[in-house]
Image (cartoon, rainbow, N blue to C red):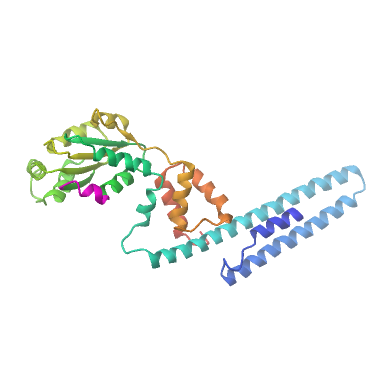
Amino acid sequence: MQGRATMMNEAKPTETKLAWPLHRVIEERIRDVIYKAEDKDDSSLRNIILADCEDDQQRACIFFNEELLKVEEDVDSLRKEVMQIEFNNHRNKSAELARTSSSPGKSRIEENMIVGMEDDFNTILDRLTAQTDELTVIPIFGMGCIGKTTLARKVYDDSSIRSRFDKHAWVTISEEYNERQMLLEISSSITGCNQEMSNDQLMEVVNRGLKDRRFLIVIDDIWSADTWDQMQRIFPNDGNKSRILLTTRLKYVADYVSCPDFPPHSKSFLSLEDSWNLFTEKIFQKDPCPALLEEIGKHIVHQCRGLPLSIVVVAGTSWKNGPNA
C-alpha cells in the first residue's frame, strides 16, 4: 500500500493549480480509489491467512495479485486524467498571457515553427546573399510536413533579405500545375494583372516587370521538372544577383533545377531536443513545462517523429481542447 499511496500523492493536484470545485471532485475520486484499494487488500490478505491448504493459499495469492493490478490500473488512469487537467489548466493560463502580451497580428505558430531550423535558415541566407551575379535557383527538398515552406517563408519575410531585392513574389504550385494561376499570382505581385489577359500576355507582363530588376521569387511545392521547364522562361537572367527559392518533396526535381555551385538543401527531421523545444514553446510560450507533464509531453513529441508541422498541429490541438477532450 505504501507504493500505491506514493502514486496517489503524485496524482493528487495542488489547490494552486486547479480551480477549487474541480479540485474537490478530484480529491473525492482519489479518496474513493484509495478506500476501494484498502478494502480489496484487507479482503485478499484475510483469504490468504485463513486458507485451509496450500492450494487455497496459492489461489488466494493469485487473486490478490489480480486485484493489485486492477488497483494499479485505476491509479494510472486517474493520474493520467489529473495530468491532462493540469496540462489544460496551465495551457489556459498561457493562452491568457499570450492574449494580453502579444502584438496584434503576430502569429505564434509561425514564430515557433522556426525552432530547430536556425542552421537551415542561415544556410539559405548565405546562398541568397552570395556574390554570384547570375540568376540562381536555390532548392530546398524534403518530405511533406518537414518544414520546407515554413523555412522558405521565414527567409522570404526576413527584412534584411527583402531589402536586397526590388521585386518579390511567392507562388504555390502543388501537384496539379496550373499555369494560368501561377502567372496571375506572380503578375499580381510584380505589376498587377488583368484577369482578361491571355497566358502569353501574362508571361510578357511578368517578364517585362522583372527585366533589369533584382528579384526574389519563391516557388513553393513544385512536383516535376517539366513544370520548371515551363516556368523558367518568364524569369530574365540579367546578371544582377536575382534569386529563385524553390521547395519540393522530390530530390530529382531539386537536382534538376539546382546550379552547380549551389547544391539542393536537404531539410531534415528535427532532433528530439528541438522537437521538445518547439512543442513546449507552442504550448507554454516562455514558461517551463511543469515537471508533472514532461512524461506525457515527451511521449507525444516522440510520436511526431521530428516533423515540425505535426508537432505544431498536435500542440495546437492540445491548446484548443478542454479538460474533457
Q: Residue lying at the far right in this picture: please name it.
A: 52
At x 26% / y 37%, what residue is drawn? 127
Question: Would you say residue 175 is visible in this rendering?
Answer: no
Left or right of 100, for residue 48:
right
Residue 13: say if magenta: no
Q: How many marks?
A: 0
Q: Position of residue 10 (x, y in %)?
A: 65, 58
Question: Would you say residue 301 is visible in this rendering?
Answer: yes
Residue 163: say if magenta: yes
Give the image quarter of residue 228: top left
Depth check, front residue: 10 or 172? 10
Left or right of 102, for residue 164:
left
At x 63% / y 58%, what residue is drawn? 78
Q: Quadrant of the N terminus?
A: bottom right
Range shown magenta = 157-166
Q: Position of residue 321 (x, y in %)?
A: 47, 59
Give the image quarter of residue 77: bottom right
Give the image quarter of residue 8: bottom right
At x 29% / y 40%, what residue is drawn? 124
Q: Residue lying at the far top in this picture: please name it.
A: 260
Q: Residue lying at the far bottom in this picture: please name it.
A: 21
Q: Position of residue 216 (x, y in %)?
A: 19, 43
Q: Position of residue 319 (x, y in %)?
A: 45, 58
At x 92% / y 45%, what residue is drawn? 53
Residue 159 against residue 250 in the figure, above or below: below
Depth check, front residue: 271 or 296? 271
